[in-house]
Image: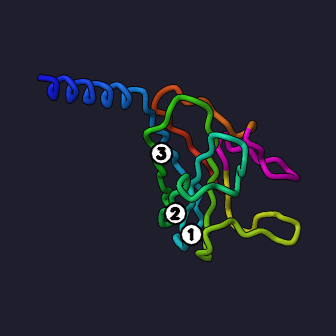
């Protein structure tokens, strides 16, 4: 009897916890070539945004000119920002020139593109209450 009660409570808690989990679907558009990979990174704090994501917060998919979709699931409600880059040469980062200007295509949530600096977390963040779909255009 006690074993069934514990099992039932565990099942109830796991179902209840998943009911609060959300999914962010990121549609990446304007991919110019099928070469390389598209890296998607999710941030829930400004630390490291947009280019220094922890490995566990990234995913890499083969580039496709018709677009790719990154999916982040099991997320709590809150504020998030997404950065995306097209890693053509396979070094798993956005290459920049001497002045720090990206040489590979990139984008962030809200499609923020400041003229003379990298976008910051506050400009790119969005609120997740339920499952969310966003589109990011590479440039």
Residue sitting nearer the eye, 57 or 31: 57
Viewer can see residue 101: yes
- Assign the C terminus to one quadrant of the image: bottom right
Whether residue 69 is situated above or below residue 109 in the rendered picture: below
- Assign the N terminus to one quadrant of the image: top left
Residue 118 lies in magenta, yes or no?
yes
The Cα–Cα distance between marks 3 and 1, rounded to whole angstroms, is: 24 Å
**Region of the chain picked out in magenta, as a range:** 108-121
- For disc 3, the marked residue is 72
- For disc 1, the marked residue is 33
Task: Tell me where residue 93 appears, x and y as whole percent.
Answer: 66, 67
Relative to 136, is 64 on the left or the right? Answer: left
Viewer can see residue 139: no
Q: Single out the residue that lies furthest toward the front.
A: 2
Q: Based on the displayed image, in which of its 4 quarters is residue 80 positioned?
A: top right
At numbered mark 2, what does the secondary structure look like: helix, strand or loop?
Answer: loop
The structure residue drawn at horizontal position 51% and vertical position 58%, both measured from the top left corner, is 59
Task: Tell me where residue 5 appears, x and y as whole percent.
Answer: 19, 23
* Magenta stretch, main secondary structure class: loop
Q: Single out the residue that lies furthest toward the bottom.
A: 89
Whether residue 47 is situated above or below residue 34 in the rendered picture: above
- For disc 2, the marked residue is 65
The structure residue drawn at horizontal position 87% and vertical position 72%, both measured from the top left corner, is 98
Q: Single out the residue that lies furthest toward the left.
A: 1
């Amino acid at each position: 009897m006690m074993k069934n009660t514990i099992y039932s409570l565990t099942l109830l808690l796991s179902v209840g916890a998943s009911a609060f989990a959300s999914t962010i679907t990121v549609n990446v558009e304007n991919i110019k070539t099928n070469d390389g990979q598209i890296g998607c990174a999710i941030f829930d704090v400004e630390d490291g945004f947009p280019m220094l994501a922890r490995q566990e917060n990234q995913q890499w998919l083969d580039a496709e000119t018709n677009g790719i979709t990154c999916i982040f699931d099991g997320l709590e409600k809150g504020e998030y920002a997404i950065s995306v880059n097209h890693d053509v040469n396979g070094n798993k980062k956005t290459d920049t020139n001497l002045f720090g200007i990206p040489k590979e295509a990139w984008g962030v949530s809200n499609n923020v593109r400041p003229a003379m600096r990298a976008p910051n977390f506050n400009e790119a963040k969005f609120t997740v209450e339920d499952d969310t779909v966003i589109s990011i255009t590479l440039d």
